[in-house]
Image: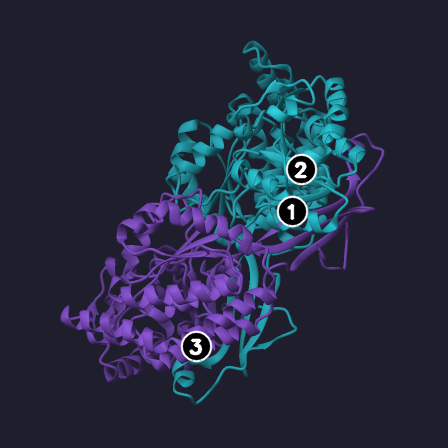
Chain colours: A cyan, B purple
Amino acid sequence: MNMKELAQRAKKASIALAAQSGEKKNLALEYIAQMLDSRKADIIEANSIDLQNAQKNDLEKPLLKRLKFDEAKIKGVCDGIKSLISLEEPVGVTQKATELDNGLELYRVTCPIGVIGIIFESRPDALVQISTLCLKSGNSVLLKGGSEAANTNRILADIIAEAADKAGMPDGWIGLMETRDDVAAMLKLEDCIDLIVPRGSNEFVRYIMQNTSIPVLGHADGICHVYIDSEADIDMAVNIAVDSKCQYAAVCNAAETLLVHAAVAADFLPKFKERMDANDAVIKGCEKTRGIISAEPAAEIDWKTEYLDNIISVKIVDSLTEAIEHINTYGSGHTEAIVTKNRDTASQFMALADSGNVFWNASTRFSDGFRYGLGAEVGISTNKIHARGPVGLEGLLIYKWKLIGSGQTVAEYAGGNKSFTHKNLEKNCDI
Amino acid sequence: MNMKELAQRAKKASIALAAQSGEKKNLALEYIAQMLDSRKADIIEANSIDLQNAQKNDLEKPLLKRLKFDEAKIKGVCDGIKSLISLEEPVGVTQKATELDNGLELYRVTCPIGVIGIIFESRPDALVQISTLCLKSGNSVLLKGGSEAANTNRILADIIAEAADKAGMPDGWIGLMETRDDVAAMLKLEDCIDLIVPRGSNEFVRYIMQNTSIPVLGHADGICHVYIDSEADIDMAVNIAVDSKCQYAAVCNAAETLLVHAAVAADFLPKFKERMDANDAVIKGCEKTRGIISAEPAAEIDWKTEYLDNIISVKIVDSLTEAIEHINTYGSGHTEAIVTKNRDTASQFMALADSGNVFWNASTRFSDGFRYGLGAEVGISTNKIHARGPVGLEGLLIYKWKLIGSGQTVAEYAGGNKSFTHKNLEKNCDI
C-alpha cells in the first residue's frame, strides 16, 4: 500500500473512530494490553533481530538500550495502557452550552482531530504509547519509528491493529510508515492528515515544519534559561541552576543559558562553579562572568545554542528587563525559570517571558507531561496556538458545535419576529 | 517604515501588552470610543474622499454601501467597543491548577497569542472591531484593509493608536499595512507574526494558506449541506432548506447542496421547488432529482462548488451513510444540517459529519459568532486545531504554564526522596 492509500484509509477510519463509545475504545485498549502480553515471546524475538542488526551496525550503547524491548518494557507499556483505560472518556465532553432561543440549544463538544501523523525516535515503547493515546482520543494514527526498530515496530503495529479489530475498531485507523520517502509523501497529504507530531532532532523537526502546510505540534530547539535575580536565595539559586543543567543535560528542558543579576554575581558564581566542576560541566561566560570565575569565553552564537550536553553559557545582566529581553530574543519559547524572593519580580518575569512554561523558584527540568500530571505526553509544544508546553491527551482533541433546533430559520430572527436569548445552560449535550 | 520594522515593533509591543491589566486595557478602549466620537467629522471627511474615488472608479453599489462610514456606523462601532469593555477580562484566567507536591503548584493560565496579522474586506468598521478585539485580548495587530478604504482606515488606525497611547498602551501594538507587497512580506515574517486571519474571497484565503508557514485561522470554501432524512417533517424540511439557501445566498454559511433521502424525494422536491421558484433561485439536480422536478443537470463539479448565489445543487441519496459520505467527500468542514424526527439518526449524523458545525432541525445560516452569542466574531474556522467554527475572543488566546515552587529540583524526585502528589487545586493563580 502506498502512502496515499494508507492515509486515505486512515482518514476514512477516523470518521468511524470518532463515533465509537468510550466503552468500546476501552475494550480495544484492554485487548491490546492482553495481546501484547500473550504474544510477548514473538515481540521479543522480533526485537532480537533488530538488536542483532544494530550491533552489526555498531549502534551506540545508549541507543541499543533504548531499542531493547524486553519483558519489563512490555509490562511497562501494558501498565501504561491500563492507566489510559482508567482516564475519563475525553470525547463528547460539553465545554459550553447556550440556549440561543427557546428550543434552540447550542453545545460545544470535544471531538478527535482526525488523522495524526507521528514520527518518533527509536524506542519501540513510543509506538505503543502514541497509538493507544490516539485510540483513546478517537484519532487515526500514521506512525514512523526509527528504521533500526523496524521488526519490533512491525509486530507491535500488527498486534495493536489485530486486537483493536477484535473489539470492532474500524480497519485502517493505525498505519505504519516504513521509509523516509513515506514521511516526505505524508507532508504533502494535507487532505488526509490533520496534524503532524514530529519527535526527534532539532534539524529534523525544523525540516518537517518548513516542508508542510499541515499543522505541526512540537518544538525544534529547547533553549531554556534560568535567571538569578538580585533578590535570590543564593543556595536555592545554585541548586536550581545545577539541577536545570546537570540533572539530565541531553534533553529539551535542560537550561542552556544562565542569566545572573550583577548584584549577586560575585556571591553566586563561585558557588555555582564549584558545583559545576563537581559535575564535570563546562561554563562559557560573558566578559563580566570571566572577571569573577574562570570560564571559556561565550560568543553571540552561544546564546542561540542548544548544547544538549554538560555545557552552560552564563551572562551577567543589570536588570530584570535585560534578562527578559535576552530570553525573548534568544529563547525558543520553551521554559524559563526565575529564582527570587521578591514576589512582584517573579510575577513580572512570568508575565513578560514569552514562553510556554515560566517557573518561579523551581528547576526547568519540571517542564514535562509526566511531572505536570498530564498522564501520557504527546510532546512539548513551542507553538503559539492550539496547545503549548507539555501536551497530553487534550492536545489530540478539538471540538465541534452541535445545534439542536426544532425547525428554526434565520429569516424569523432577521425579520424581528424572534430574538436570541443567549442564556448559559447548566447541562451537558446528550446527543 | 517597512513591513519588517512594523512587525518587529508589533512583536516588541505584544510582550508589554500581554502584561497590561484588564482595567488599563478597558481604559484604552474607553478612550478609543471617546476619540472616535469626538473626531467623527474628520473621519467622515476622510471617508468622503474614499467614496469620491470609489465613485470615479465605478465601484459597485453594494460595495459603496459597505465602504460608507457615516455617523450611524461610527455610533455602531462605539457601541461595539462598549460591549467589549463589559466582557470579563480574558487574560490571566486559570484553566487548571494542580499541586505537584507540597509547595509546588502548577497553573495553566490564559494569555494572548502575540501578534495577529489580519486582512479584511472593504468595510472600515471591521478595522475598529478587529483592533479592539485584539487589544482586549492583549494581542498586537497588523491590519490590511481594502485599498478603496485607504483614507478611512488610515485615520481610524491613527485615532486608535493615539487613544490607546493616552491610556499607556505600548507603542506599535497596532500597525497598518497599506499595499499588497506588505501582505506578501508579512507571510514570510514567521519570527514576528504568530497567527494570520484572512477574510476575503476563497482564492485569496487559499493563496494565504498556501504561501506561509505561519498558522492561518479561517476558511476558504463554505460548502454547506442540508440533508433531508427519510423521517423528516416535510414542511420543516422545506423551510430549513429554503432558509439555508435563500435567506442570504452570498455568504459562507449558506447551503450549496441539498441531499434528499429517496423515500421522501417525491413528496419534498415539488414543494421545495415551488418555494425556490418564488425566490428566483436555480436548482441543479442529479438524474433522479430531474426525474421528479424540472432542474438544470448537476455534474460532479457542482458538488464542489460554492455558488455564493441563488443556486443550489440537489442529490437524491439512498441512506444516511451515503449522505455522510457525500458530505465528508465534497464538504469543506463548515456547516451541515440534518432534518429528521429520529433522534438516533440525528445523533449519528452529528457524530459522523466531519464539520465544525453540525445542526439538527435548524438552518445552516445560524452558523455565526453573533448568533452563537460569542460577542464579536474573529472569523469562521474550518481548521482542525486551535479553534473551529465561529471564533470569538477565545480564538485570540492561548495559555502558559506557571509553576510556583520553593526551590525544588528534579533530582530529589528522580532520586526517590520526594514524589508527586498531582492533586487538583480548587483555586486560581494569583501571580
Marks 1,2: beta carbons within 8 A: yes
Helix, strand or loop under label 1 = helix
Circle 1 packing at 10 Å, graded few (<14), some (14-19), many (20+), is: many
Q: Are marks 2 and 3 on the same chain?
A: no
A207 above or below A352?
above
Residue B165: mark: none
Q: Quadrant of residue B73?
A: bottom left
**Pointer 2 chain:** A
The amino acid sitting under disc 1 is: Phe
- Residue A289 at x, y = what percent? 65, 25
**Pointer 3 chain:** B
Residue at image mark 1: A349
Which residue is at the front of the view, B338 or A133?
Answer: A133
A150 above or below B91?
above
The amino acid sitting under disc 2 is: Tyr
Mark 1 vs mark 2: which is more N-terminal? 2
Residue B44 shows in this picture: yes
Left or right of A402 in this view: B219: left
Q: Quadrant of residue A293?
A: top right
Helix, strand or loop under label 3 = loop
- Residue B83 at x, y = what percent? 52, 75
- Residue A257 at x, y = what percent? 62, 30
Which residue is at the front of the view, A165 or A145?
Answer: A145
Residue B232: mark: 3
Helix, strand or loop under label 2 = strand
Residue at image mark 2: A227
